[in-house]
Image: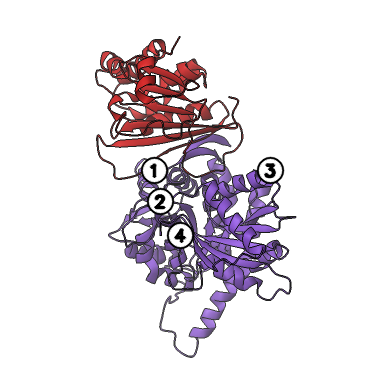
Chain colours: A red, B purple
Amino acid sequence: MEKEILEIRWHGRGGQGAKTAALLFGEAALETGMYIQAFPEYGPERTGAPVSSYNRLSKKPIRIHSGIETPDIVLVLDPTLIGKVDVTAGLKDDGVIIVNTTKSPSEVRKMLGLKDSIKVYTVDAYGIALATIGRAIPNTPMLGSLIKATGILNFDHLLESVRKKLEVKFRGKGADIVDKNIQAIKKAYEETKGEE
Amino acid sequence: MKVVAKTANEAMAEAMRQINPDVVAAYPITPATEIVQIFSSFVHDGLVDTEFIAVESEHSAMSACIGAAAAGARVMTSTSSQGLALMDEVLYIAAALRLPIVICEINRALSAPINIHCDHSDTMNVRDSGWIQIYAEDSQEAYDSVIQAMKIAEEAFLPAMVTADGFILSHAMQRIDMLEDEEVQAFIGEHKSPYNLLDIYNPITIGPLDLQDYFFEHKRQEADAMMKAPEVIKKVADEFGQKFGRKYGLVEEYRLDDAEYAIVVIGSTAGTAKDTVDMMRDKGHKVGLLRIRVFRPFPAEEIVKALKNVRVVGVMDRADGVNAYGGPVFMEVRAALYEEEKKPDVYSFVYGLGGRDVKPVDIERVFQMIMDADKGKKIDRLNYIGVRE
């Protein structure tokens, strides 16, 4: 991590787990000794409505408490947000955008009118979630894509960290659901595509 | 010590668990709901010995806390905004009866219009209720301050509230260095109330009618306790710092030594302002920051010492005085400086009401305005920043 503070914005729809993804990622980063922030944007919360959540990561204590306006990385958990929400707002010129879609990165680049300096990655998180978890929940697969695209954290560490958190979260609901989520993260990691 | 990721709500609930109070009477309210919710799960899981009283309103919550504290119990609660406002009447009673109750408070705007986000109108509304007020800059400080507040309250015989900014801190996860349960217990010690209502061998009356003959003397004693509280707060903070390595004071000075222009601020905005100060220092501006951590008792001496050599001060208030001369922090800071022969010019900046985001660029603008004022440009004494008008 070269930047002093790395800022991430997650776009999703209410119920898709954008907040949980930011929390899981934040905790995994914390365990590597980094300072972190993970916070959702609170508004009227309705299932299906556009929502966003955020991470800050730094090797030094983070003092800033304002909203994130110029993220280094943007993740889009639902392809239908594109055109409805300005998902690239403030994205830095050397930024990265990762989109849950069946489209190719170059198609997404065209759709969003992105500068050449911005890197684009895509993954079919819905397809992966349906095949592994059995429900189209895109948040955990997108964690795999985030690591694949950026390498911010060691992938095995992320898997281990998320497994521990999900075991607590799904306590009493069986180990099965945890395994399926881990499988989804691995599959997304393998299937995340960048441009050649 | 262990490193964990927690929101201010979670961290304050953990501090309550580690304090293990005898009684918690509470009514949940956004954005402090989680504190009560998490703590009630600790009660359910048998992790604390607390008698948890689920009441029907905040007025009842504080009333139950007063009863329990008068009976010699170690007592805590949590609330926010309208909830704190509903407690108002009984807050004064808790303070005047000298009961060491601790509130974990989350700052949220008072209605109307209805809003759930951060400003300081709720705690500023009760600033003269006789409660010690500690404003946390981040969740680590919220956690540390709750632990300190319990000890402060019991040594000063005054109730104390520790506040953290709603959502900005209450719902934002950050790194927290948590103490061990035993360390917290050893730090706060055993609560020894000098008297209690349930001591049948030494019967006392608490809260009887007190008319012209003694009311004034009792209020004077309450004021005296508050005037002596800074020593207790500093002593407890020093002990905390020596034991656990994190140092706190009544105020925090940041790059003020040679500063010509300073901002005074409380709460989480201080963190954003520190980054802004660094940014402006890099550009060659002699700027600094004073964060007031303890607003009650008001640390006038420390404030004067920190600011008297500055040329111009901008006091940022996250609460409006509405019809006052300026924001509440501004008025007291300016009044404290009045006797000084050499003193800065002081301006009021009201910002961030109802959770309006405050960015480094907003703080830079405040600095710019006070620097312009110093160069002779006329600016208003009271300024509203970050608002459409």
Report the chain holding disc 3: B
The answer as to whether the residues below labels 3 and 2 share one chain is yes
Task: Name the N-terminal-most of marks 3 and 2.
Answer: 2
Nearer the observer: mark 4 or 2; the answer is 4
x then y, percent, for residue A115:
46, 24
Q: Chain of mark 4?
A: B
Mark 3, residue position: B282
Q: Secondary structure at mark 2?
A: loop
Instruction: Identify the mark nearer the N-term, 1 or 4.
Output: 1
Marks 4,3: beta carbons within 8 A = no
In the image, is residue B138 above or below residue B320?
A: above
Numbered tag placed on residue B120 in the rendering = 4
Q: Chain of mark 1?
A: B
Contact, CB < 8 Å: mark 1 with mark 2?
Answer: yes
Q: Nearer the viewer, residue B297 or A86?
A: A86
Residue B322, by quadrant, is: bottom left
| Residue B50, numbered circle | 2
Which kind of residue does numbered mark 2 sit on? Answer: Thr
Instruction: Give the spatial CA distance, label 1 vs label 2.
Output: 9 Å
Q: Nearer the viewer, residue B100 or A42?
A: A42
Q: Which secondary structure lies at badge 1?
A: helix
Judge depth for marks 4 and 3 and give the one in front. Answer: 3
Q: Quadrant of the C terminus of chain A?
A: top left
Question: Label 1: which residue?
Answer: B42
Label 4: which secondary element: loop
